[in-house]
C-alpha cells in the first residue's frame, strides 16, 4: 500500500493506554476495565445528539486464526501448559494497548479523566497527547460486531414477545444458524443492566477518510484511523 501523506490523516494526535503486566490480574480483565473507563469518558465528552469526537484503535489486534496459531506454536515449544496459558493471558487477541485519537492536541488535553480512571492508575499507563506520525502507510476502521443470538434465546424471546407456544417458536427458527464469532473481543459491563457482555471488534483496512465521528465506544465502520 502506498504511503499516505500526513495531510490526508485527520487524526493528528493520540493518547496511548497500555495495560501493564500483573501477576494477579489478567490483561483481558484490565482491558475490559480500561474500555469501560474510556466509554464513560467518551459519553461525558460527547454533546447530546452528536457523534463522539474521539476514535480508538487496537495496535496489537490479531485475527482469531493468528492468535490460535501463536498459542499452538507456544504449546509445541513448551511442555508446561500453564506457561502457555499465562502467555496467552498476557497478550489476548485484542492486545494490551488502546490508542485514543482526536483532531487536535487541545481536544485530548480537555478530557476529564479523574472519575473514569479511578483505580486504574497502578495498572494502566497513559501517555500525554502525541502527534500522529507524519507518514502513515496503513489505515483501518474498528467497528463493533454484534453476533446473532443463540436459537434458544430467540425462541424464548419470541414466546414472550409474541405470546406463542414453544412449538410455534421453534418452527419459526428451525432454519436459524447461530453466528459463531471469531473476532477479538473485550469483556464489558452494561451501566444500565449491570450485565456482562463481549464487545467484539472487527478491523478492516481502508483508505483514509475525511469523515469524522464515532460511537461512544470510539468505533466506526466508515471512519478509518492510522495504524502504526
Image (cartoon, helix red, strand yellow):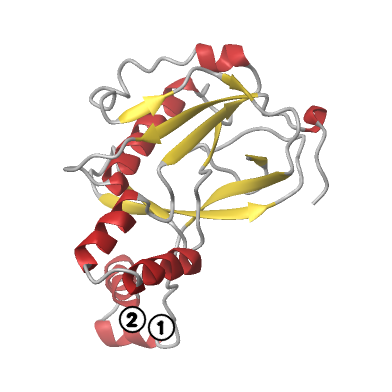
Residue 138 in the image: state x and y as whole percent.
71, 45
Point 43% across, 31% down: residue: 17
Q: Dot 2 corresponds to which residue? A: 169
Which quarter of the picture shows residue 73? Answer: bottom left
Q: Dot 1 corresponds to which residue? A: 172
| Tag 2 secondary structure | helix
In the rendered image, the vertical position of residue 216 relative to residue 2, given as above or below: above
| Tag 1 secondary structure | helix
Instruction: Examine the rendering and report whether any part of residue 182 can be seen.
Output: no
Residue 23 in the image: state x and y as whole percent.
19, 43
Comparing 227 with 39, the one in front is 227
Point 63% across, 40% down: residue: 228
Residue 182 in the image: state x and y as whole percent.
45, 67
Instruction: Examine the rendering and report whether any part of residue 227 can be seen.
Output: yes
Point 47% across, 62% down: residue: 183
Q: CA distance from mark 1 to mark 2?
A: 5 Å
Residue 39 in the image: state x and y as whole percent.
41, 33
- Left of 93 or right of it: where is 12? right
Q: Are marks 1 and 2 in contact (CB under 8 Å)?
A: yes
Which quarter of the picture shows residue 68? Answer: bottom left
User: Mark 2, residues whose alpha carbon is within 10 Å: few (<14), some, or many (≥20)?
Assistant: many
Point 26% across, 82% down: residue: 166
In the rendered image, the vertical position of residue 127 relative to residue 17, given as above or below: above
User: Mark 1, residues whose alpha carbon is within 10 Å: few (<14), some, or many (≥20)?
Assistant: few
Amino acid at each position: 500500500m502506498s504511503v499516505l501523506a500526513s495531510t490526508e490523516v485527520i487524526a493528528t494526535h493520540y493518547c496511548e493506554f497500555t495495560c501493564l503486566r500483573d501477576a494477579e490480574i489478567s490483561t483481558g480483565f484490565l482491558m475490559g476495565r480500561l474500555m469501560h473507563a474510556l466509554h464513560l469518558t467518551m459519553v461525558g465528552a460527547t454533546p447530546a445528539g452528536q457523534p463522539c469526537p474521539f476514535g480508538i484503535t487496537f495496535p496489537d489486534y490479531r485475527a482469531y486464526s493468528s492468535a490460535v496459531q501463536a498459542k499452538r506454536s507456544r504449546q509445541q515449544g513448551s511442555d508446561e501448559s500453564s506457561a502457555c496459558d499465562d502467555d496467552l493471558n498476557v497478550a489476548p487477541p485484542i492486545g494490551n494497548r488502546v490508542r485514543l485519537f482526536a483532531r487536535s492536541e487541545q481536544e485530548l488535553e480537555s478530557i476529564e479523566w479523574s472519575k473514569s480512571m479511578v483505580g486504574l492508575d497502578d495498572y494502566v499507563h497513559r501517555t500525554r497527547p502525541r502527534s500522529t506520525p507524519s507518514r502513515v502507510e496503513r489505515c483501518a476502521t474498528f467497528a463493533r460486531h454484534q453476533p446473532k443470538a443463540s436459537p434458544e434465546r430467540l425462541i424464548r424471546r419470541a414466546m414472550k414477545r409474541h405470546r406463542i407456544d414453544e412449538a410455534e417458536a421453534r418452527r419459526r427458527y428451525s432454519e436459524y444458524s447461530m453466528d459463531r464469532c471469531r473476532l477479538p473481543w473485550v469483556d464489558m459491563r452494561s451501566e444500565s443492566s449491570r450485565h456482562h457482555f463481549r464487545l467484539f471488534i472487527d478491523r478492516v483496512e481502508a483508505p483514509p477518510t475525511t469523515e469524522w465521528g464515532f460511537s461512544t465506544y470510539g468505533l466506526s465502520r466508515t471512519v478509518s484511523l492510522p495504524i502504526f
